[in-house]
Amino acid sequence: MLSAIALTACGGGASDGGGSTTQVAQAAQPQLLATVTSVSELYVATTGSDTNSGSASSPLKTIAKASQLAQPGTVVHVAPGTYPGGFKTVASGTATARIRYQSDTRWGARIVPPSSSATDSAWDNRGNYVDVVGFDVDGSVLQQGTAWTTGIYNGGSNDSIANNHVHHISKAACTTGGGGIGVDSYYGGVNASVDGNVIHDIGPAVCADMHGIYFSTNGVVSNNLVYAVSETGIRLWHDANRVTVVNNTLFNTNTGISVGGGDYYHTAGPSDYNRVSNNIVYDNRSYGVIETGATGSHNVYANNLLAKNAVADWRLQNGLLASGSISADPAFVNYVRTGGGDYHLSSASPAIDRGNATSAPLTDLDGAKRPSGATFDIGAYEFGAVGGTSGSGSGSTTTQLPTTANHLYVATTGADSNPGTASAPFRTIARAAQVALPDTTILVAPGTYAGGFRTAASGIAGKSIYYVSSTRWGARILPPATSSNDTAWDNRGNYVVIDGFEIDGTTTQAGTPWSYGIYTGGSYNTIRNTHVHHIASKVACTSAGGSAIGVDSYYGGVMGTVDANLVHDIGPAGCSFIQGIYISTSGSVTNNIVYRVAEAGIHLWHDANHVTIANNTVAASNTGIIVGGGDFYRTAGPDDYTNVTNNIVYDNRYGISEQGSTGIHNTYTNNLVYQNASYDWSLKNGLKSVAGISAAPGFAAYTRTGTPDFRLLTSSPAIGSGSTVRMPTNDFVGIVRTSADIGAYQH
């Protein structure tokens, strides 16, 4: 393994006036949270302790402890990592001051079974006016004790369960009831929202009591993707009434949607005044949409697409009929019944512009605005819509697939002895690479995969090999139990695209710790839409170096592309050899968000030349951007004809710096560089910044220690102040750039 040699860094503070590598001091945090009368933010991390204050610098260990301290208006920030489930949260907010439990990286905070479980729910919330947002509830690894029958259970009122990934719940045995997400009236709960969740693999085969979403009160169920459920995808029962079930996509369940009432807790029924509209209910084993038990005459079924449901599409009561229905294949981009496909609508879908505006949500599962066409589409995804709204950068949740002649599939349920088809997938990415040919898409299903592997297969010009996480950041590369490599993913192939993966080095295992996230030594390769974080945070700081994403010339690689990646928490504090994005060849670095890096957010060195660095946002690191060459592998330098444009470089120790060997043709235009502690600019050869801005960037919500939201406020000086020359067509979340804004986001 030579990547450690190949990526040795020059270090921003060690040469050419970089100065000391000591980080800017953090403001002191309160130490005794119990004495604080108003708590607006609490922090939870796997490295914390429940005896801590709960501040950003002194986080708690558990969500349950944060709940004990939470007051109305508190946001509980949960850092990426693995947390034992089986806990209860009871704190309540108010109508004007809700309590929000938030995974600061979407699906980065993972709730898994404890070593010995004493409860049947992963997360049991009893508080009112509570939001549970962005968690991964994963029951795939069974432990001792009580098996989980419900992923997220909610017994409170006026609560919201949004943007979570709940999967592999109660797969081992058929229980007397449960599901992925349960919203219950048993404790008097009313008025709930379940929006934008991905729920799958719930219950064992042929189990009549396990559901994707079960709902027994009033409220809204919208924008959810639900599949691979043993009984009902969405079930209304008990006291369910006045429920809006709208713009969901369901397939591969027994029954898609069931509306009914019975076994009442607090009402006498029936289930009435419900609205079921704009849903895709497709390819289920029994019925599409049914009424059962006690139902009223005021339920409405409008503009749904139902097809290929084995027994019947509809079974309604009281003489009710569905209106505006479509019976046709929904024409997904890539339909895979067992999961791992792309369930966006293709341009040929009959669901486009066929929805009903009444009660339709104004965003879709990706967080993109509805409608994007003449009117609302049917299903969880709006066709042609772009632009998610998550501050952590999770725009589209499903990666758009390339058009290739060949396809291979990888899933956690697969085996490397399989043929790699959709129905018989491989188990590992490395095995898929061994059989991949040029013009192949390797589609990787959501799940956790052991890192420390190498891919060597090459495409050819016009026929690349694409490694694609079917759900953006859904395929997660983690350290293996015993690591023998210092790199999560080492690619040596040419004409390769790595798209949409999460590389998470938070949990250190035995063996060699990771110093590198994604390393590529090949030519004409692209790394895009990935989330690389907590890499090299626990390694010794040596000249061996390290980086989140490395594009290297050591093996002869040229022309690397690094686009629209989220990179943060890289390296131990004060280490000048650990970089965020490291480029030692020609290519482009565009639309990336980089923060909290030990040395440079973006670092050019070795044979770097002819590089475009455009529309990136870099903050809270030691150095923002370093342009330079030295320790050459295959050239004599200098780093020349590099163009740095439209970047935001904010709140670092150093801003933009030329170091080592640099030429006279480098350009620096239309960058916003501000509040970098030692200097904003340090250029050579008489070069100057042109059309630059020195002002606060006007981010939506900036923090050095939590999860910043780098979108631009309408008052931001970065809006319209960029250059169209070398500006990428789309932004960080795929929005088409219609004006020349500075930074990773188009406003």
Image: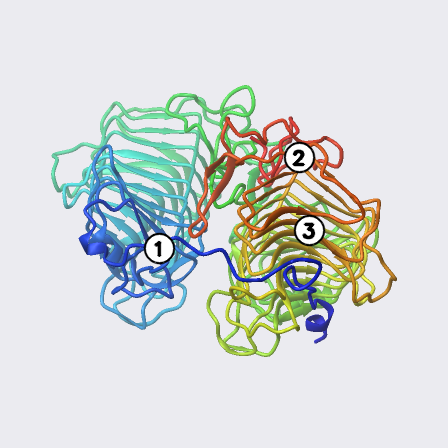
Residue in the foreground of this view, choosing between 341 and 739:
739
- Drawn side of residue 640 relative to residue 60, left or right: right
Mark pair 1, 2: CA separation:
33 Å
Residue 29 found in image quarter: bottom left
Question: Of helix, strand and loop, which one carries label 2?
Answer: loop
Q: Residues within 10 Å of mark 2 (few under 14, many from 20)?
A: some
- Drawn side of residue 727 relative to residue 572, left or right: right
Residue ID for mark 2: 692
Q: What number of labels is visible?
A: 3
Residue ID for mark 1: 28
Q: Residue 714's mark?
A: none
- Drawn side of residue 613 relative to residue 132, left or right: right
Across and down, in percent, residue 448 comes to: 50, 63
Q: Residue at x 26, y 40 (%)?
A: 73
Across and down, in percent, residue 503 comes to: 55, 60
Residue in the foreground of this view, choosing between 475 and 719:
719
Residue ID for mark 3: 657
